[in-house]
Amino acid sequence: MQIGALALGGVTLPEILAAREASGTGSSDTSVIMLYQHGGASQLETYDLKPDAPLDYRSVFNPIPTNVPGMDICELFPRQAVIADKFSLIRSLHHDVSSHSDGGIITLTGKPPLIQDPTSQSKSDHPDFGSVTSFLKGIGEKAMPPYVTIPRNPYMTRPTYLGLHHSGFEAGDANSKSYQPPQVKLAAGRDGEFLSNRRSLIKDFDRLRSDLDTRGQLEGVDRFRDLAFDLMTSPHVGKAFAIEQEPDELRDRYGRNEWGQACLLARRLAEHGTAAINIYFNTPKSGQEFTNWDDHIGNAGRPGHFGKYMRVRLPFMDQALATLIEDIFERGLDKKILIVVVGEFGRTPRLSANSGGTGRNHWPQACSALVSGGGLRMGQVVGATNSKAEYPAESPHTPQDLLATVYRHLGIDPAATLTDHSGRPVYVLDSGKPITGLI
């Protein structure tokens, strides 16, 4: 949401309003918080452990029971175990793309890349769920950005034909000392008269450009600029980002690390009206003992057994996620807010080992996801994999099905159409239906 980017999109305000009308969106007071596990979390070390599988397949951790009979999860998730009635698991997600960027593109946009890139440098041809939500729901009356990413945007997705102003608003690391969101920093030291004069200057420039506009492409730009100005000056927005107003006890409960404070900030933003929040759930801290979810041998140059690094990482996830779930239920926000935890794929069921260590490689054929809130059915296990967690054996679902469930909560019709750069209609989703076991 940079002011200078607001005129760069290929769409006009009337097009946006028409799309919202067709989709039936714009007034639904709901939010989605996604914890995107970049790297691809192992299903076998989180939510689908297979303790009876052969030794070179089964989880390196033990399962523990939860307060939902028959739902066992990883032993490093004790706080989640006692609130399992407040979330549901999907154990049968699958697709067919095994590189990080392309897998992320499918998971976040629902559209497979036109050309796969095994080097994981590809960028999306279509917008992700947050940009779609921004386009169809727009900035609310109190100027809350509709799509916020914490701490930054996913590297593999772009708003593409929706325009740069529908990129995620990058909130930064909420765990940093003296945290301020980027827009607050931008406005710091600038009084209202300065900002007002700047807005007036920009409008004069736009009116000059409009004399040359023969296709109506600048229609609505003033409105976008007004919304950006409102975002910079709105006390409601400032309050939403003011994580320092939270009690120290609650901040400690979430965890004084990037993941914990990101989840707390996400709850605040959802409370205040942001529709889509995507947490780039990469690592909770920096340091030699911390790696992301890409748990193959030598991940991030770290030697040894991947279980060593997961044993460090998973308690941070348990603390942050369990507190977020508890918090939204305690505040009565479990129908307004939907939490989704997912990565771009799972990991190979069979362990790989060599002189450098032990790990699991990329495996899109089976992965798990967690959902909480959103008025969905909780305490459920949807789908199942076979005895080695290789493939779905019951109720297979795709990332598109998960996204359709997300869009349902947001009041967005997956059959609504967007317009690409060439003027052709593009469905929000080409395939996928909401997951019936959750509804």
Image: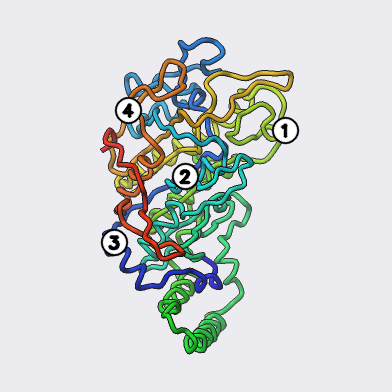
For the residues carrying marks 3 and 4, which lies nearer the camera in this image?
Answer: 4
Q: Residue at x 45, y 64 (%)?
A: 422
The residue lying toward the viewer, choosing from 33 and 387, is 387
In the displayed structure, 243 sits above or below 354; it is: below
Q: CA distance from mark 3 to mark 2?
A: 30 Å
| Quadrant of the rendered image containing residue 316 | top right
In the displayed structure, 61 sits above or below 243; it is: above
The residue lying toward the viewer, choosing from 322 and 117, is 117
Say the numbered circle drawn on residue 27: 3
Do the numbered discs 3 and 4 sit on residues whose CB atoms are within 8 Å? no
Q: Amino acid at mark 4?
A: Ser
Callout 3: SS: loop
Do the numbered discs 1 and 3 sit on residues whose CB atoms are within 8 Å? no
Residue 179 percent coordinates (x, y): 59, 56
Whether residue 427 sits left or right of residue 229 in the image: it is left
Say the numbered circle drawn on residue 112: 2
For label 4, the residue is 395
- Screen quadrant of the C terminus: top left
Nearest to N terminus: mark 1 or mark 4? 1
What colouring does the structure picture have? rainbow
Residue 10 percent coordinates (x, y): 46, 69
Nearest to N terminus: mark 1 or mark 2? 2
Nearest to N terminus: mark 4 or mark 2? 2
Q: CA distance from mark 1 to mark 2?
A: 30 Å
For the residues carrying marks 1 and 4, which lies nearer the camera in this image?
Answer: 4
- Residue 303 visible in the picture: yes
**Tally of marks:** 4
